[in-house]
Every structure is written in structure tokens, then in C-alpha cells.
Image (cartoon, helix red, strand yellow):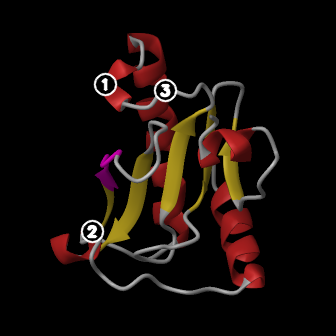
Amino acid sequence: MASVFSKIVAGEIPCYKVAENEHFLAFLDIFPLKKGHILVIPKKEVDYIFDLDSDTYSGLMNFAKNVAIAIKKVVPCNRIGISVVGLEVPHAHVHLIPINSVNDMNFSNEKLRFSKEEFEILALEIGNNL
């Protein structure tokens, strides 16, 4: 069964797309810890990040790096934190989260809420900085 991320890649479920190429996709997390929280995925469905072949893994990290640089240009923060948890969706993915302290990456924190328009504007602003 296709993961929710595979359905996003296939266009069956909408997302707030920030960046995309032939192999990878970056989109805003709809349950963000911080403004600018982005998920970066390979389009190829692989459950566990360390099961990715070496080229896909390296490509994912390089793609994520470029997205992180764009986030930092738009969202004021000290750093862009990176997290790979991999339990919530059976599709390898990387969380990029603007942070000012380590506590900003605590997934137990309350998730933020934004309007559709706020998500759309943020996705466009970050995407325009790639």
C-alpha cells in the first residue's frame, strides 16, 4: 500500500510544495513544530532511510541542504535543525526545522496552526529562495 508521501508524489493528495526535481520533493509539514518546518522525501518509496541506495541517500541530503539554505533566508532562526525519525510514515523523509534552541525540535511540543493562505505564501517565499 502506498504511503501518504507516495500519494503526495503522485498528486493524489495536495501539499504545499517548496521544491521538486526528478528524484526528490520538499513540502511544508502541515503539523509544524515551527514556521518553515519542511519535509524532504525521495520520490522513490523506501521505508527506512538507511535502506536507500547510496546515490539516493546522498542526493536526498544534498537536496535537503539546498532547501535548508532557502528556509534560513526566509525564516529568522539560529539554525535549521535536521531530524530523521522515520516511524510516523513508512517512507524515508527528513524534517528540516528552523530552530533557536534544541527544545524547538521536541516532537512532543504543540504543533502550530497556519491558514491555507499562510502556508501557500510561505511555500512560495522559500521556493523563491532556492
Q: Is residue 10 left or right of residue 98?
A: right
**Element assignment for label 1:** helix
- Foreground mark, 2 or 3, reads 3
Is residue 47 highlighted in magenta?
Answer: no
In the image, residue 70 lies at what x, y percent?
54, 55
Residue in front for this viewpoint, 117 or 46: 46
Residue in front for this viewpoint, 1 or 40: 1
**Which labelled disc corresponds to residue 50?**
1
Residue 21 versus residue 110 in the image, above or below: above
Residues marked 1 and 3 touching at CB (< 8 Å) = no
**Element assignment for label 3:** loop
Query: Which residue was labeled with disc 3?
Result: 46
Mark 2–mark 3 distance (CA, rounded to whole Å):
24 Å
Q: How many marks?
A: 3
Three-letter amino acid code at the position of disc 2? Met
In the picture, the quarter occupied by the N terminus is: top right
**Element assignment for label 2:** helix
In the image, residue 90 lies at what x, y percent?
46, 40
Task: Looking at the image, tell me whether mark 2 or mark 1 is earlier in sequence order.
Answer: 1
Query: Which residue was labeled with disc 2?
Result: 105
Mark 1–mark 3 distance (CA, rounded to whole Å):
9 Å
Three-letter amino acid code at the position of disc 3? Val
Residue in front for this viewpoint, 89 or 22: 89
In the image, residue 114 lies at what x, y percent?
62, 85
Three-letter amino acid code at the position of disc 1? Phe
Q: Residue at x 62, y 48 (%)?
A: 4
Highlighted magenta segment, given as a residue range: 82-86
Residue 96 versus residue 31 in the image, above or below: above
